[in-house]
Each structure stands twice: as C-alpha cells, then as structure tokens.
Image: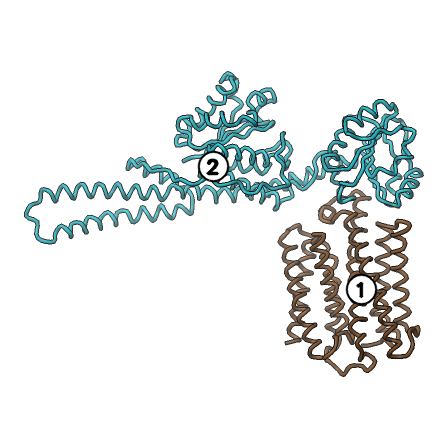
Chain colours: A cyan, B brown
Amino acid sequence: MNIIVVGLSHKTASVEIREKVAFAPTRMEKPLRELVGLDDIGEGLIVSTCNRVEIYATTRDIAGGMARIKRFLADYHQIPYDVLEPHLYCHHGEAAIRHVFRVSASLDSMVIGEPQILGQIKTAYGYAAEFKTSGIILNRFLHKAFSVAKRVRTETKIASSAVSVSFAAVELAKKIFGDLSDKTVMLIGAGEMCELAAKHFLNNGVRGVMVTNRTFERAVKLAEEFDGKPVQFEDLFDQLHKADIILSSTGAPHYIIRPKEVEEVIRRRKHKPMFFIDIAVPRDIDPKVNDIENAYLYDMDDLQGVVASNLQQRAGEAGKAEAIIEEEIGQYSRWLASLEITPTIVALRNRFEEVRRAELDKTLATWKDLPQGSEKRLEALTSAIINKLLHQPTSTLKQTGQGGRTDLYVDALRQLFDLSTAQPEEEYAPLEDVDESISAGKG
Amino acid sequence: MNDLLYRITLICYFLATIAYLAFLIKPRDILAKAGRWTVMAGFALHCGFTFSRAMAAGHTPITNLHESLSFFSLAIVGVFIAFERKYRTAILGSFVTPVALVLMFSSFGFPSTIGPLNPALKSNWLTAHTVFAFFGYAFFSVSFGASFMYLIQEHFLKKKKLGTMYQKLPSLDTLDDINYRCLTFGFPLLTLAIMTGAIWAETAWGTYWSWDPKETWSLITWFVYAALLHGRLTTGWRGRKAAILAIAGFFVLLFTFLGVNLFLPGLHSYK
C-alpha cells in the first residue's frame, strides 16, 4: 500500500485557482466519500485551507491513483482539467511522507512556523475519522505527522517568535505586562496598521479599547468597530493614564506625546508600566519617552527590527527542523513497510504449502506399493524441503524490515509468486487531545 | 551517614546549578527538568541531613556558622521550589540555585563538629527565632534573584535587545510580582525573628535590646525592607526602583548575617 499526496498550494497556484479548488469545511462528507469511492483508492483525507488544498490517500496503483485524484479534483470543482493540472503536485512514497511532515510542521507555510496549519490538518483528519475515510495507514500517518510537528515546535525555535509587526507588538506587551486580560489599549489616530495591531491585542484578550481622533466622528466609528470607548482628542491627556498600551499613528507633523506629559501620566498611574507603540511616520511620540522609568517606547523601526531578527532566527531553525523530519521519515517508512512483511510471508508460505499438498496428494494417490510408514516420511521430507527453501527469504525480509527497501522485496515476491494478501484491519484511532495552543484557524 | 547526606546534598546542588546555568545558555527543556529534579532530590536529602543532625545534637541545628549557612541554603531551596511551582519559571533557578550552592559550599568550609551547646543558646526560643530569621532571609534571597532578573529583562526591553535570554526570561510583571510576594512573606518573618529575638534576649540577658551589632544591623535590614514595602504600598514604587532596593536590601542582609558574625564581635558572634 502506498501513500500518495496530490494538491496545490500558495507555491504552485494563485489565489484565483486556490479559491476554486477549496472545499467548504462544513460539507466534507460528500467529497470524502467520493474520494474513497474512486478505483484503487483505499483511504482518503482532504486538507483545505486558504493557502493549500491537498488530498492524502492510499493506493495500490501509484500512477493510476494520482491520475484519478487529479481528475476528481477537476471534476468535483468543475474546473477544466487542463487548467488545473499544471498547478498540481503529486508525491508518493518517502516524498509524500516528507511533504506531509513538512506541511504539518509549518515548514511549507507562507510564513514559516505559523501555528495555524497544524490545527487545520487536525481538523481535516477529524473529518476523515468522522466519516471513516481514513484507516490504519492514514491514522498512523497523521498521528505521526502531529507528533513530528510537535517535536519540531518544542525542539526548535521555529514558531517561538513573532514575524509581523503587530504580533511583535503583542509579544512585547506580554513580556512587559505578563497577562493582558486586565489591560486597556488606547488608539490614537487611525490607519490600517494601527487597527490591525488593535485587533491582535483584542484577540490576545485585552480588556478594552479606547479610541481618539482629531475628528471625533471617526473615533466614534472606530470605537464601535472594536466595541470600545471614543475619547475627545482634547481629553487625551486626561484619559491617557487609564491606558496601558498606547498605539499611535496620527498624521501629525510633530510629536504629540512628550516626556513631560508621560511623566505626569505615569505618576498618576502609580508608576504602573506603559507601553507606547508609535507606528506613525513622522513619529508621534518623542523618543525620549523611552528613558522614563516604567515607560517603554517602540517605533516602527524598532518593531521591524524585531521582526527581521525573528525571521532570521526562523530561517536558521528551519534547518534543524528538516533534520528532525528526515529522522522521523525513516522511522515511519520502516513501520509502513513492516506492515506488508508479515502478510507477504504468510501468503508465500501458503502458496508453497498449496503446491506441496497438491503434488504430494497426486503422488500418494498413484503410488500403490508404498511401504508401511512411508507416507509420514514423505510428508516430513517435503515439509522440510519447503521450510529450508523459505528460511532464507523469510529472514532476509524480516531483516530488511529494519533497514528500508522492503517495498521492493515485497512487490517482487508478490509479482513472482502471484500473491494476494488481505489488508490488515485496525479500529479507527481517536484523535489525541488537540493541543490547546493550536487553534484550528480559518486561514 | 550524616556526613554522607551532607556531601550528596552538596553534589545535588552543584549539579542543579550547572543544569540551571546551562539552561540559561541553551534553551533545552531537558536542562530545566534536570535542574528541577536534582534540586528537589538535594532538598529532600538536605531535609534528611538537617533532621538527623537535630536528632544527634538534641537541639535545632542552627547554632554555628556551619549549621546556619546550611540551613540558610535549605530555606532558599525550599522557597525557590515553591515559587518555581507557582510561577513555572525554571529560569529563576539559574539565579537562585547559585546562591544556595555558594552558601552550602561556604558552610562546608566551617567545622562541622557538634560541640557542646553555648549555654546562652539553650532555650526553646532558639528554634522559633532562627527558623523565622532564615526563612525570612530565604524569601529575601529569592527576591534578590528575581530583582536581578528584572533589571536584566528591563535592560533588554529598554535597549531593544531581544535575544534568546530575553525570550526565556519571564515578563517584567511576573518578576515584579515574585519580588513583591517575597517581600510580603519575608518582611513579617524578619519582624517575627526580631521580636522573638527580643523576647529571648529578655529571658536570657534580662534586657530586650542591647544594641549588639547583630541587633543593630537586623534593625537596619528591617528598615530597608520596611521602606521598600511602604514605598510599594503607598507611592507605587515598583519595577526598577523596587528591584534595586531589594538587591541593596539583600546585601545589607548578607552583612547582618555574615559580616556581623565574622567581623563585629558581639553577643551574636557564634562561629
């Protein structure tokens, strides 16, 4: 049995193609059932995110299975096959295993190390398990992929740092305040960057948002969006002490917040720390504010510096992650191969036994003047012959089970002796507790 | 037997310190785990040692520098284990276990024979007074570690140097919280130690307070921490200022404990 992967991702297809091929997360039963209904396809699973659509399946016939899945993707989404085909990649064997391990470990993501993908694959596996389209091979395969991803996350620093300016701001805030749940964000001015950062802070559990703007109506509008409180621009310094995190991006040509004001505000706050994030260019906040005790000021350059060094660190960690993956591939493919060994040996033995039995019966039926007890001796003799003959291949097979290349031997034996083996069965393995920190993002 | 326990404890603390210091440089969870287990094993052995020594001597084994240093170290490790469990910050170990190790190692340098008990120490107050004092000291030592970490982390945040160490250190808020928590435990304990000491002095020497160097310096230490606590509660001293004061307080405390015994002769100079 072979594992194959057919799919497309942000690396091979534009968003126009990707959105056409995406599967609706709420209606996975139909495509999954159709997938495993295809000829030669055993088990099947569909991963569909905004950056990739991939099908993992098992098949006896690699080329045929891949072709059928490609055709299925085109037909299901009613896209002309010729349009879709150039964007699709196919992997089998070790390459397929490597691909899935890399995707789960977020090495194939647009932003390397982003944590959503693992949750998305877990969700996809959840559907396949629910509709029983995954079986022993994919169950074990996906569990392995999850544990590899976890290993990569714990043993490397690939996902330990923020790689966007707004995430970097949130991480800094966590290092200053610890818990954000009782913290308030003050938005000064508007702008995409500022709003994005405010959203990140809200997602990370800040208690409330205050918004101020030179045009009060805009402040009101934005405050509504964040379920926050609008503040008159003139009242800024009356209200500033209530804010722990200040996000500023006004179009003002000069500093609007200076050390003198911050000193006063901090005193009013009983020296509780304040985190100023100045996203405006030219800057809104006097850099000297950073020299005040318990005030921390980061401007756009600082944040970008943080992101740049984080990205660099991730790239460095990716090498370590790849090494972990290579190690795990070896382990998994050995297990996969070993699945085939025992049934093959049994089938081979049965085939030999069949021949022996048939020939022996034929001989015994015609050989009339057989001396007393010869029957038993003939029985023993023929058994000994096939045991001797089978001993070497059996032990060779078992040994290769620990060292790879098993599929080669298994396939050769099957074809040479025309063996057919029953597939091993295993109950559906329940999904391990989904790591709380990984949310099944919508991405 | 007793000596063996002591030596194994010392080895455990040594290994734990190495593991925690290595954890500071290499972000491997296994190092933190190794540190945690060895320090806990050391603590268990250390408790065993202290107990068996108390049995052998027939009184609380805090009567000379060897015993005091060892008990000080025991208290620090105990307080550290509690804080580590509560705040889940293994890296605190990198700053606290070295202190415990140094104290334990210094105690090694003083004679460990159990001599006849100094008659002045023969009292039921001995246990209360010394245990209060050393647990108070232990909380202040952990506060010293946390303050030191605070200053480092604050430096990283202010200078925008966000390296591996920055990532591993807990948030400023957590460190400040540990610092404050230590103060709220340590200060009452120190107060109790001074009070029990005064009552004991009254029963032993007939006067509550005799301005012996130990008493004077204990009072100074008490004032430093009282000022810190007061500042925190009223004017909102926190963070950097509080950390610097906690560090200063710790050095005053060290002098009260060691300096007085070694350099200033007085009623408390038990070597």
Amino acid on which disc 2 is placed: Leu
Name the image quarter holding residue A67: top left
The percent position of residue B55, horizontal first and vertical second, equals 69, 77
Q: Is residue A401 something one can see in this rendering?
A: yes
Instruction: Say if A229 sits above or below A331 in the image.
Output: above
Q: Quadrant of the N terminus of chain B?
A: bottom right
Discs 1, 2 touching: Cβ within 8 Å: no
Q: Amino acid at mark 1?
A: Tyr
Q: CA distance from mark 1 to mark 2?
A: 59 Å
Q: Residue at x 73, y 59 (%)?
A: B80
Name the residue beneath numbered marker 2.
Answer: A138
Q: Position of residue A144 (x, y in %)?
A: 51, 42
Q: Mark 1 — on which chain does it sit? A: B
Which residue corresponds to the image point at 72% horizontal and 79% vertical from the top-left?
Answer: B58
Chain ID of residue with mark 2: A
Mark 1, residues whose alpha carbon is within 10 Å: few (<14), some, or many (≥20)?
Answer: many
**Residue drawn 86% across and 64% down?**
B252
- Please give the residue where the numbered disc 1 appears in the rendered image: B137
